[in-house]
Amino acid sequence: MPKQDVTRLFDRGIVVLSLDTEQLWGYFDHMSEARFEAQYPDALEAHEKLLARLCAARISATWFVVGGMTLPGTQGPRDGRLAGLPAGWVAGIPEGCETTAPLWYRQSFIGRLRDSRPRQEIGLHAGLTHFIWTDARATREVVRWELAEGVKALLNSSIQPRSFSFSRDQEAHYDLLPAHGIRCFRGRTPVFASQLGPTIPGALLRVVDELMRAGPPPVWPRETLPGLWNLPSSLFLYPIGPARTSLLPIRSRIQRFNRGIEAAARCRGIFHFCLHPENLAESPQGFSLFDELLERLDRARSNGDVEVLTVGEAVSRAQYAFARPAPHSDIASTSLAGRCN
């Protein structure tokens, strides 16, 4: 791939919003339905509110959707679409439909999301069931089944997923993605706390970053395999439940969001901000927080400091930029992330 000066990839900063849209699929392996509803009251309404706010602000985001949400229903563990997955994993998936199990099946919402204006990009999150690709049971054939059935579920809802996010950021089997029509994925945040993953040291470092209001790194897409691009995250919304906000006030989330926008504008890079819709249902202040984030983003966009793109649009922009004749530079495209401080 040609070498590029990072400051010449884009004409100005870019902000990308991506949302892991999973409902109970993302929690059922460690949380009961009752506990989910207690921790995330009105989670279903949170999706509707989030979509309405994005449309009102004329912002297109990338919604990474678990394929199971698009199904009209399943027969639970007996369903043929789950046949290639470990029995212990699918045992917790209930038989039902949107009427009887709305925390699992949301075909009507996915339809509204697909048809909304401005257009919202819909990618695939994990596959059909939010199976963890690094799980001890994750053989190549199991992962292939999870991915193929997830793509098929979205296709049956007239959605062709081209972008992808891994469940819990556990990356593996990259080569399966292009074979199923995926051309870009969201990679891990290029900071040490994220590289440590869901460990105690990683959790402690994330607390430190939040306490220090650490500026999120601007990121740039890079080609991982021929035809497969990685757009890393810059920052995930830190939880806003009572236990977290007693130590870390909600204002810290706003300050770090601002710093992410400023860094993207200064470096002409990408601020890739991520969250789960359920995050906003954790606190009565969730949507006032999100409204303030959107207000600050809109101000930066109106001032011409940044533009807002989806994951797919940002990757396409980078592909076009890399295809242009490269200026005299010795900065390699594979080491762009984190260069600008």
Image (cartoon, grey):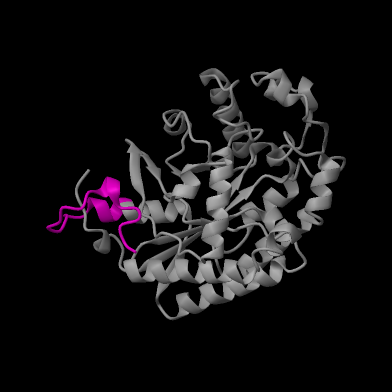
Rendering coords of residue 55 (x, y %) = 62, 67
Judge by depth and name the residue closer to the eye, 73 or 231: 231
Q: Quadrant of residue 82?
A: top right
Instruction: Please say whether residue 57 is visible from this viewpoint.
Output: no
Q: How many marks?
A: 0
Which residue is painted at 31% across and 63% down in the image?
10
**Please, which residue is most extreme toward the left here?**
328
Q: Quadrant of residue 198?
A: top right
Query: Which corner quadrant holds the N terminus?
Result: top left
Judge by depth and name the residue closer to the eye, 18 or 218: 218
Q: Quick check: is 339 in the magenta stretch? A: yes
Rendering coords of residue 91 (x, y %) = 77, 24
Rendering coords of residue 257 (x, y %) = 52, 67
Q: Is residue 130 left or right of residue 326?
A: right
Q: Is residue 210 above or below residue 102?
A: below
Query: Which corner quadrant holds the C terminus?
Result: bottom left
Q: Is residue 335 left or right of residue 298?
A: left
Q: Is residue 332 left or right of residue 297?
A: left
Which residue is painted at 71% across and 54% down in the image?
278
Magenta residues? 319-341
* Main SS, magenta residues: loop
Which residue is painted at 64% across and 68% down in the image?
290
Judge by depth and name the residue closer to the eye, 337 or 46: 337
